[in-house]
Image: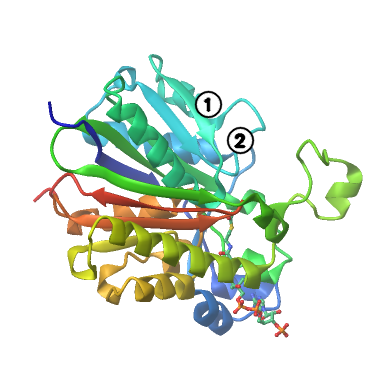
Amino acid sequence: MSKIRAAITAIDSYLPNYILTNHELEQMVDTSEEWITTRTGIKTRHILKGTGKGTSDMGTKAVDRLLKKRGIKPGEVDLLLCCTVTPDMMFPATANIISDNIGIKNAFSYDINAACSGFLYTLGTAALFVESGKYNKVVIVGADKMSSIIDFTDRQTCVLFGDGASAILLEPTTENVGVMDHIFQSDGSGKIHLHMKAGGSVKPPSHETVEAREHYVYQEGKAVYKFAVANMADVSVEIMKRNNLSSENISYLVPHQANMRIIESVGKRMGLDKKQIMINIERYGNTTNATIPLCLWDYEKQLKKGDNLILSAFGGGFTWGAIWLKWAYDPDV
Ligand code: ACO
């Protein structure tokens, strides 16, 4: 019997309406449109506005659109995984909330937190469920309301991030497409460079932690940058080598969108042309768990069945990894 593989069979997304421009950021912190564009590649990002709105609001819209696009009823879903660093609450899992909003009743659901590598880790995990033969319809939703944990007085960080959600459906196939290989790594010693200081069990919220602005992303940008370039490039080159893939065999690199210069360095190490790299950072910024599926969604019409894609990410933890994915369907004509 041929091997069961996990194939992405549909993708859809939701981006909130409000668009935060570099010019607006110039009014908020000591920065310039020119600095942000040349140092990061970002021009605009979407921001979820409105009291009482969280990550699940965006995730629910993305999943609802996904199921309608593929013509699937909520009751058919076996498993829903949500990757996020900005859950609605510490518990229950945002995945449970999204499932309830959609009416997904015959499934189990939980969250995965691997910072900016979350979508890759979750795709790898979900692929194993599908490959087991026990689960036929698995939804992954990558969603983050980064604006809820960004200090809009910290110019080094606030220019980088945006909000958004993107969802994919994974289904079994016996064709030679889908998730072909993956490499995942992590190193917890990286936490000194990228973390949130308070709000967890070590330092629960208090007046002092709020006054000290410790509920926001803390990052040492330069250190993170160096680790990101080295590790994303290493793992992407390694997955190519061990599967005998040359740069000509690769249709696209699908990189986590953190900084245009990181993306270009990784592409260069892999020997790729710029046209072989999915890039949308200029419009969305770093949406953490949504960046990679947002790229696939934006480029969906250009993808053909059998295209070789290398998905690659680096994030807080540190976490990093790469997936070799063979695209499973042709665009609608
Ligand atoms: N506008 C103007 N100047 C700025 C800004 C800004 N927004 N931010 C920093 N600067 C200044 C600095 O203060 C510094 O000034 P100085 O030389 O007078 O000290 C100068 O610009 C250069 O600063 P660097 O930190 O050297 O700038 P760099 O080129 O490294 O760019 C950046 C900074 C964009 C943060 C980059 O390091 C980066 O992208 N790092 C990776 C961040 C990342 O990917 N994080 C994602 C992980 S998040 C997660 O996992 C949840």
Residue furthest to the left in view is 333
Query: Residue 275: x and y, percent?
Result: 26, 73
Residue beneath the point at 55% across and 55% down: 315
Query: Residue 229: x and y, percent?
Result: 50, 69
Residue beneath the point at 37% across and 40% down: 167
- Disc number for residue 88: 2
Q: Is residue 154 above or below residue 92?
A: below
Q: Quadrant of residue 173?
A: top left
Residue beneath the point at 23% across and 53% down: 300
Query: Residue 247: x and y, percent?
Result: 24, 69
Mark 2–mark 1 distance (CA, rounded to whole Å): 9 Å
Query: Residue 213: x and y, percent?
Result: 81, 55
Whether residue 258 is visible: no
Q: Which kind of residue does numbered mark 2 sit on? A: Asp
Q: Which residue is at the front of the view, 7 or 184?
A: 184
- The reply, left or right, for residue 328 in relation to residue 325 is left
Mark 2 crowd level (few <14, some 14–19, many ≥20, 10 Å Cα)? many
Circle 2/circle 1 CB separation < 8 Å: yes
Mark 1 crowd level (few <14, some 14–19, many ≥20, 10 Å Cα)? many
Q: Would you say the beta carbon of the disc 2 residue lies within 8 angstroms of ligand 1?
A: no
